[in-house]
Image (tube, helix red, strand yellow):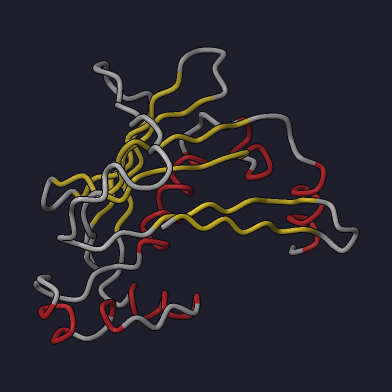
Amino acid sequence: MREETRFVNEEGRLVAVSISGSFLRGVTGFQSKGPQLPQRISVPARPAAAVIEEPTSQEQALIYRLSGDYNSLHADPEIAQTVGFERPILHGLCTFGHSARAVLRSGLVPGGNPAMLRSLTARFSKPAFPGETLVTSLWKEDGSQEIVFQTRVKERGVTVLEGGLAIIGKNSPVVQEALQSKL
């Protein structure tokens, strides 16, 4: 399933577009149905230009419920076990947010300015658990507006976000205004 949400400001000007997709674990046979998936992004064979390591807390999923996602999979051990997880998993939005922050803290975005972040995409490949350390590795070609990234869990050595791509560009006046109004 693909869902697109458009965000506009008070003047009706488009500020952002959020595109998301859903999947059901263990359900197969739908590869030829619907729109063609984009080509997967691979990380370069060379060492990363930056690596950002950041721990999550044991309470991270419970705190992250403040985003409005009350899915019991993130809080109830019994529910998590019924769908094959050893314990509650971290919200995907939290893992994605940690990766976005790593992009901004990497030194690859001028001044770490969030208004320079034009697009951020990634594929969730495995779950992260609260209390694990997220390690985001980032690659950027000189002069390129694209930053390729992946996020792994240090303790288990598994990739939780793959095919990450951040597009940076000219500072957006609409985003800059929104950021300044929140300060």
Q: Relative to residue 149, is residue 27 depicted above or below?
A: below
- Residue 70 lies, in percent from the top left, at 39, 83
Closer to the camera, 42 or 54? Answer: 42
The number of numbered badges drawn on the structure is: 0
Q: Quadrant of residue 43?
A: top left
Decide which of 16, 48 is in the foreground and name it. Answer: 16
The N terminus sits in image quarter: bottom left
Single out the residue that lies furthest toward the right: 11
- In the image, is 50 to the left or to the right of 131? right
Look at 43% across and 78% down and name the residue there: 69
Residue appearing at x 33%, y 31% in the figure: 40
Q: Quadrant of the C terminus?
A: bottom right
Q: Is residue 23 above or below residue 50?
A: below
Residue 14 image offset from top left, x and y in percent: 77, 51
Q: Position of residue 25 (x, y in %)?
A: 20, 62
- Please tell me whether residue 93 is drawn above or below residue 28 in the rendered image: below
- Give the residue at x 68% y 43%: 115
Front one among 89 and 138? 89
**Furthest residue to the front?**
33
Q: Nearer the viewer, residue 167 or 48?
A: 167
Q: Is residue 145 left or right of residue 7?
A: left
Question: Residue 83's spot in the image, x, y percent?
Answer: 14, 74
Q: Residue farthest to the top?
A: 142
- The quadrant where residue 171 appears: top right
Q: Residue at x 49, y 79 (%)?
A: 68
Quarter-of-image position of residue 85: bottom left
